Amino acid sequence: MQVLKFGGSSVADATRISAVMDIVEAALARDRVILVCSAISGCTDALIEIGRTSEPAARAALIGKLRNRHLGIVRRLFTGAERESAEAMLEELFCALENYSGTCFESFGELFSTRIIERKFACDGVGSLWLDSRKLVMTAGGKVDEGRTYPAMAAAVAAAPDVRLFVAPGFIASDENGQVTTLGRGGSDYSAALYAAGTGADTLQIWTDVPGIMTANPKVVPSAQTIPDISYRAALELAENGAKVLYAPTVMPAMEKGTDINIRNTFDPRHPGTVISGRFRPAGDAWMGVTSLAVPGRDESRLCIVGEAVASRRAAAGRMVSALAEAGISPVGEVYGEGGVFFVNVKSLVENEAVAALHREFFEDRSVVSINVFLAGYGAVGKALVELAERSRSRIEARTGRSINIVGVSDSRRFVIDMRGIPAEDIPMRLSEGESAEGGAYVAAVCAAAPRKSVFADCTDDHSLYLRYEELLRSGVNVVTSNRRSVAVPYVQYAAIKAAARENGAYFRYDTTVGNALPILESIAGSANCSDGIESVEAVVSCTLNYVITGYDGARSDSLATLLRRAQSEGLTETDPRTDLGGRDVLRKLLIMAREAGIPLEEQDVEITPMLGPEFFDCPLDEFYARLAAYEPRFIQREAELDNAGLRQRFVASLRRDPAARLGYKAEIKMRLVGMDSPFYWISGTENVTVVRSEYSSPLVIKGAGEGVKLAATGIIKDILMQ
Ligand code: ASP
Ligand code: MG
């Protein structure tokens, strides 16, 4: 048996009731259900008001209003003959209210709501039985008489073995004289716990309008979080001391029977909510929540903080006092309490501030450092970066103690800076309303606004943005770039940027400029710095060339031109793909790799033999494609010959120790023939392979995807987070 209880806001109108029915139907697929409901929200207050109003016209008006709200629900839920009969049923109940001469007016609310819901289930073909809680829940001396209540409930359910759904009003009961009474305001939770205990249910769910018991009232502390697991005792303390989500007496029956209480959110049915159980026994101090209650008759509020397994009372009290002091609040009197429950009184006026201060101290993770990121470029990579940072937020926080906070974004025309953070989904709109980025205004604004240790992430392919890097670094802003052009600049400029970073305690990182997210640069730097130097670096790192050439390896079904056009349409190439074929892009990568190995290589030091002869480069693009088509048969023939010999051609960038060369290293980019013993032989698509040889006999081989915006975003985040 399962008991599901829904509160007043969960049954407030027809739409909400439909959502409740969906949840109940899902539960029915598992097992039988007792559905316990409150009155629709505001109804109990209205009924109490009606009970107090003796003037007939005023009273009739109040009853009329309540009738109309319920009629409105009935009219939305039912049609045709079913509506007529539901209206008649409701009319009967309201007639009884009008003629009521007793004292428990508020007992009508749950009758209204559960009668409507039970009827709706019946009309939908879910046979159900309405249980009269006035006959089953019995009190004596103002307390529930469990000795009579539990057997009555068990008998009612046992008498209807074929019924899968019982619907029962919460809140109402009868006393030892047979008079209708209630279990106290908010008492439907308690009714549900009694039904669960009385029928031996194994599931007790309390569905409400917040995602479980929270570390504080979310209306007072917006950063309050759901408590996933809590003991009966701590839940009881929170409920007794001001947490409104659960009616305190509810805990006892469940605790006695060892039934878990699961608090769930009707507005977010998939959220797991809070589980109150006997199993939750943390090993060390675990703070659960902070609550507050007005102290009757005094202009004071009593704050309460509840923990489990709290080792030191003194330490806890000290933290409370200093947290309040930090917020400028002086407590009225001392901290008192014991076990895991501590109280302190403050003036009512500062109640909310005090709750927030305690919450900050005990529940907000101040060890998470927020990294402000100013993003330049909102193209494919920039968007992927924002998306990934958002999606991985909690994982990054948990694992690194840091969080990425996007505080600035620019595209080629506009920029926006907001130090509070710009949510990913707001960026396009905020950018369109942003300031003009003309004349490098974005960098100037970043330098002015950025706190030290912020990060400027260059995800553009701008040709000159790097000229502003020094300025950023001198303002204490770290620079991370995926823009290869910014790093493969003349060595003096490169060195100046590096120096600016070092001198200002900032970092300049560009790991994604070679081999995307593959750890190529860090491996080269590691080998170069920590061994006797590098013997050689050989790399097949042109995604375009690899794509085209490896396209031939197996299939040979597409022509060179087709493959190249496809590479271009997939965004792998520069606007004129010949820039890649000519080795320009690989040249940039080789410069970056060499410098990482401590070799101040310049463009002039590199000997490039393009894949194609000069006649392919000195003509317009259309003509180029025509010439490529004419050349195709020769290329195919050569590939076939090589294949027979067990060889493949690869466009390799290399740097090899050579005492005769200017810097002691010879740098070359050209087609090479490789056999099956080479790691370059075994690549496909846009894979990159880099082989680093140092003094050790076995080389380091780094192989993996060399392309992809998501990967680029991963690599940039790695750069941002690296300590
Ligand atoms: N309807 C009652 C009240 O408002 C009982 C409940 O909602 O739990 O107090
Ligand atoms: Mg309620």
Image (cartoon, grey):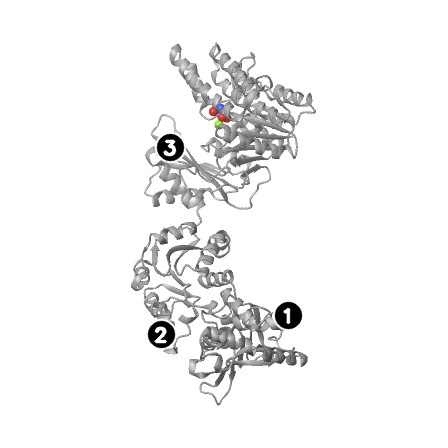
Q: Mark 1, mark 2: which one is toward the viewer? A: 1
The quarter in which the C terminus is drawn is: bottom left
The answer to whether any part of residue 429 appears in the image is yes
Position above or below: 592 against 11: below
Position above or below: 558 against 538: above
Does the residue at mark 1 contact the one at mark 2 (Cβ under 8 Å)?
Answer: no
Q: Mark 3, mark 1: which one is toward the viewer? A: 1
Q: Determine the CA span between mark 3 and mark 1.
A: 78 Å
The answer to whether any part of residue 140 appears in the image is no
Report the amino acid beneath label 2.
Ala
Q: Where does residue 243 sit, x and y in percent of width and height?
A: 46, 33
Q: Where does residue 484 sit, x and y in percent of width and height?
A: 43, 70
Please name the residue shown 67% across and 25% down the image. Answer: 163
Does the residue at mark 3 contact the one at mark 2 (Cβ under 8 Å)?
Answer: no
- Residue 335 image-quadrant placement: top left
Report the amino acid beneath label 1.
Ala
- Residue found at the far bottom of this picture: 660
Q: Nearer the viewer, residue 313 or 677?
A: 677
For mark 1, what is the residue?
555
In screen coordinates, is 348 left or right of 179? left
In screen coordinates, is 313 left or right of 419? right
Position above or below: 549 against 386: below
User: Disc 3, ligand 1: is the CB inside 8 Å?
Assistant: no
User: Disc 2, ligand 2: is the CB inside 8 Å?
Assistant: no
For mark 3, what is the residue?
301
Q: Determine the CA span between mark 3 and mark 2.
A: 61 Å
For mark 2, what is the residue?
496
Report the amino acid beneath label 3.
Ser
Callout 3: SS: strand
User: Disc 1, ligand 2: is the CB inside 8 Å?
Assistant: no
Callout 1: SS: loop
